[in-house]
Image (cartoon, helix red, strand yellow):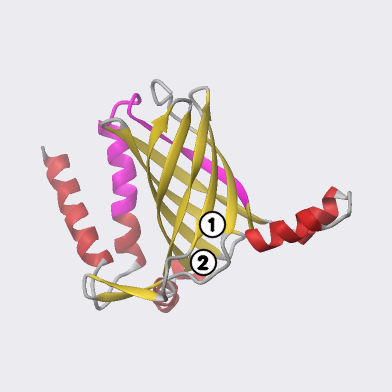
Amino acid sequence: MVIVLVMYSDKVKFKRILFSPHNHITMQKLIIPLIACFMFCATVASAQMFKIGPKVGIGATVKNLEAATADGSDNLNDKFKQANVSTQVGAFLRLKVLGFFVQPELMVTSLKDLDIPFMFGAKLGPVRAMAGPYIRMAFDREALTNAEERETMLQSAKYGYQAGLGLDLGKRIVIDLRYEGNFTGSSANVLGADRPFDSGDPQVILTLGYSLTGGGKK
């Protein structure tokens, strides 16, 4: 009972912090509730309900992929360079709820951006269909120890969306293919605060994950 009350309190505090119109938020207050959420799921949820583990991937903008495809060269290395492929590394958690699933992630892209997608979806036969928003911030290692750098990093947050399909191979291998796009306009007012939209080029992202839990039936 004490654990449940503590987790409920952390969730309420996290919502207030994340959507504060004054953006008075610190990295500790952002990360601690998220870690607590991961620990809570790992502790009180059955392994039949969730998957959690590391994830790696690659991404490229649609524009660069089209240019690489149109290139008449047969050299795959040249095409790879022309596509200007980015790399991703991070972790994911997938929680099943009433036939649907929620999948938050923490991904660092080419050591430049910290991406936090929140995917929602359902299983359609062997395939998972998903969509959801993401938050992108300029990644800075110094933000872990420097308060000013943390504030700068948090103020750089921009929002977009991802949508795609996924496939689980066995109980542990997780493959996702997604399209990442931008919302219409430059920003939106949410709970009294202006939320700027990401203006980067749309891209395609392919990721491979490994679940540290069995996750029950596929």
Residue 13 visible in the shown view = yes
Between the residue at mark 1 and the residue at mark 2, the CA separation in whole angstroms equals 7 Å
- The kind of residue on which mark 1 rests is Val
Instruction: Report the front residue among 204 and 213.
Output: 204
- Number of labelled discs? 2
In the picture, the disc for residue 139 is 2
Position of the C terminus, as image quadrant, is: top left
- The kind of residue on which mark 2 rests is Phe
Picture residue at 33% right of the left edge, 52% below the top: 34
- 6 shown above or below 167: below
Residue 168 placement (x, y as % from top left): 51, 29
Whichever of labels 1 and 2 marks the residue nearer the N terminus, that label is: 1
Residue 42 visible in the shown view = no
Dot 2, crowdedness within 10 Å: few (<14), some or many (≥20)?
many
Residue 123 placement (x, y as % from top left): 40, 31
Picture residue at 34% right of the left edge, 24% below the top: 48
Position of the N terminus, as image quadrant, is: top left
Whether the residues at callouts 1 and 2 have beta carbons within 8 Å, the answer is yes
Please give the residue where the numbered disc 1 appears in the rendered image: 108
User: Is residue 45 inside the magenta stretch?
Assistant: yes
Q: In the picture provided, is 41 more to the left or to the right than 161?
A: left
Under circle 2, the secondary element is loop
Q: In the picture provided, is 31 more to the left or to the right than 12?
A: right
Please provide the residue range marked out in magenta.
33-58
Picture residue at 48% right of the left edge, 24% below the top: 171
- 143 shown above or below 180: below
